[in-house]
Every structure is written in C-alpha cells, then in structure tokens.
Amino acid sequence: MLINFNNLPEVNIKSINGGLGNVAAKMFKNEFGKVILSRIPPNSSIGMHVQKTSNDINFIVKGKGKAICNGNIEDLSPRRMPLLP
C-alpha cells in the first residue's frame, strides 16, 4: 500500500500525553491500523504513555531522541539500513 502523506492534513498537537511543546503529525488510518508521520521539535516530547492496543515503530529520519520501552531507555537516531542481497 502506498500512503501519500503529502495529501494528508497536518495537525499541531500541544502537550500530547502531557509532553512538552508541540508535535506536528499527519495520520493515515483504516480498519487494519494507523501510520503516523510526526515531527517532534527539539525540547519537545510526546509524553509518557502505554501502548494498549498496538505497538509503536519509531523510524528516525533526522535528529536524536530517547524512548523508554519496558523500563529501558533507548537512544533514537537515524540508522543506516543494510542492503538486501
């Protein structure tokens, strides 16, 4: 499935989940799930929350951040993906 995020409206969410600052997001949603493209500016956060019905996949394009998963702090940054044979 191809999702063209250029055709989706962007919303600015202030203090999402009690986090700091504003987060800009575009969301695609259907009966199978959702994909959210977001920009989290420096010194902003999405706040502490629990995934109850799905999992998060964080794909970092630019910048650095941290996530807490199962009590462990994970550093987030762009990673070079291995080429497939």
Image (tube, rainbow, N blue to C red):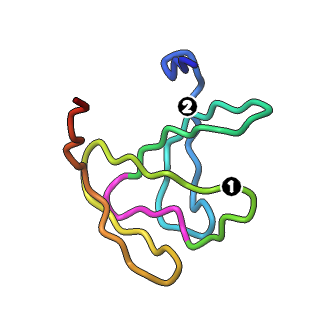
How far apart are the two marked residues, 2 and 1, measured between alpha carbons?
22 Å
In what quadrant of the picture does the N terminus appear? top right
User: Which label sits on residue 27?
Assistant: none
Residue 56, horizontal then vertical, whole percent: 55, 55
Residue occupying the point 56% across, 40% down: 36
* Secondary structure beneath label 2: loop
Q: In the rendered structure, are the residues bearing label 2 and label 1 in contact, judged by CB atoms less than 8 Å apart?
A: no
User: Could you tell whether 5 is left or right of 29 in the image?
Assistant: left
| Residue in the foreground of this view, choosing between 73 and 18 | 73
Which residue is painted at 33% across and 48% down in the image? 60
Residue that numbered label 1 is attached to:
54
Task: Establish if 61 lies above or below 6.
Answer: below
Question: Dividing the image into 4 quarters, which one contains the C terminus?
Answer: top left
Indicate the amino acid at tag 1.
Ser
Q: In the picture provided, is 53 more to the left or to the right than 66?
A: right
Mark 1, residues whose alpha carbon is within 10 Å: few (<14), some, or many (≥20)? few
Q: Is the magenta stretch mostly helix, strand or loop?
A: loop
Q: Which of marks 2 and 1 is nearer the N terminus?
A: 2
Residue at left offset 80%, top offset 32%: 31
Q: Nearer the viewer, residue 6 or 80?
A: 80
Towards the viewer: 48 or 24: 48
Magenta stretch bounds? 41-47
Which residue corresponds to mark 2? 10
Is 5 above or below relative to 63?
Answer: above
Magenta stretch encompasses residue 45 = yes
| Magenta stretch: includes residue 52 | no
